[in-house]
Amino acid sequence: MSGADANSQGLARRLNLFDATMLVMGGIIGSGIFVTPAEVARHVGRPVLIVGVWLLGGVVALFASFVYAELAARRPEVGGQYAYLRDAYGPMPAFLYGWALLLVIQSGGMAAVAIMFARYFGNLVQLPLTDSAVAVAVLALLTAINCMGVKSGSNVQSGLMVLKILAIAVLVVAGLLFAHAPAAQPRAEAGDSVSMLVAIGAAMTPVMFSYGGWQTASFCAGEMKNPQRDLARGLLLGVAGVILLYTAVAFVCVDALGPSGLGASKTPATDVMRLALGDKGATFIAVGITISTLGFLSQGMLTAPRVYFAMAEDGLFFRLVAKVSARSRAPVLAIVLQGAAAAVIALSGNFGEILSYVVSVDFLFFGLTGLALFVFRHRHPDQKVAFSAPGHPFTTGFFVFACFATVAATVANNPVNSLIGYSILAAGIPACLYWQHKNRKAPA
């Protein structure tokens, strides 16, 4: 194996700029964009605000891509966000992020999306299987594919991402050309400025959740041929592409259904396609949503295990998880661990509660990661990097503020579920102390 093909940790460097861009987009676009516009419309009933909050969320995501692109240029290591937190604050915050990723953020999200895939897939093919059985089966299949190597997993994920983009493009074009606009509807009351700001804040929570996931591509930095260049560019291209797609979908939904019709819809994408192309259109978008959920699962199975691998490399997790297959050059045990955790949650049926506190935990670490850029710039003011965040410190500061504001809003609206999430996070403190103690006792 050539030096360009492998790194010191045994992982293979086989991902290029296209792979990085598809990973960024695949980590963001799941099934949410097909249903979330209706949730937004229920909070803000004016068309300009319905589309505007998606643009505002896109600005936050774009500023996030600036931050993560510079961090990738400064720390092109396996684990991405885990490595940024570790180098900025030490092992404890980094471990807690990996702990939360395994027990709350990634596995809970994947379990919920796997169940959603099973429901759409079951409606399309009418299999005599339970949703949980189908969900576990697809998680097992994706686990096996990713154990075959990073390029194998990336090829599947990229192919599914291209199909996702095509499905969204068909939704936008069909909606614009064939979905008839509703009759004139009464304009929503403007309300006072305070109540309007509260409504926009409430609408931003599902929007920010839909934009989340840009960070997962950084987990695979150690398997990119040129992470300083390709990861930074992939982040910018991927996030820009998602902003374009999301804003177009929001515009088409409100244009075809109207603000009140959109707010009353449970499945806005399906309603738009049925309005445009009849039952065939509804079936097409159901296939598109199924592919989108599968692509999200594939991306999660490819990226998140690299965090557990990095934790094990640092001596903060089971050493076996840091083993790389001699055949596939993939961290097989880390991948199997991720698949098993998601499958257990899918079988338990408790994933709904987990999703309700994912945001409060996830955006806490987003904010800390944004602050890490200030830490690195202060510590290493003369470090030469391939990419510098445009508008820093203002863009970085705005991103950090938006993250902590999202955490505060989520905790205020869901205090019980947020407490559960932070309790799981706190349980990681003694676990980290145990691994640190064990690591100090281990022979060199």
Image (tube, rainbow, N blue to C red):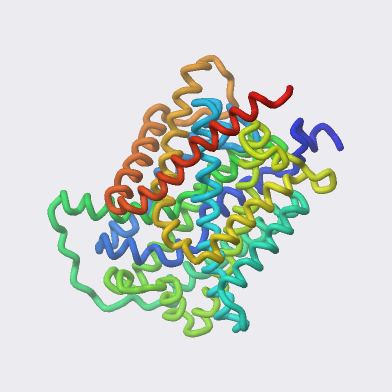
Residue 27: percent from the left, percent from the top?
55, 52
Q: Residue at x 35, y 39 (%)?
A: 404
Residue 285: percent from the left, percent from the top?
52, 73
Q: Is residue 416 left or right of residue 14?
A: left
- Which residue of the protein is positioned furthest toward the top in this rendering? 382
Q: Residue at x 44, y 55 (%)?
A: 210
**In the rendered image of this protein, does residue 299 appear above or below residue 253?**
above
**In the rendered image of this protein, does residue 227 appear above or below residue 168?**
above
Q: Residue at x 70, y 42 (%)?
A: 321
Give the image quarter of residue 7. Answer: top right
- Which residue of the protein is positioned furthest toward the right in this rendering? 1
- Viewer-side residue, 217 vs 119: 119
Residue 441: percent from the left, percent from the top?
66, 25
**In the rendered image of this protein, does residue 368 appear above or below residue 20?**
above
**In the rendered image of this protein, does residue 195 appear above or below residue 279?**
above
* Residue 27 appears in the rendering: yes
| Total tally of numbered discs in the picture | 0
- Viewer-side residue, 292 vs 107: 107
Q: Quadrant of the C terminus?
A: top right
Q: Residue at x 27, y 49 (%)?
A: 412
- Viewer-side residue, 155 vs 85: 85
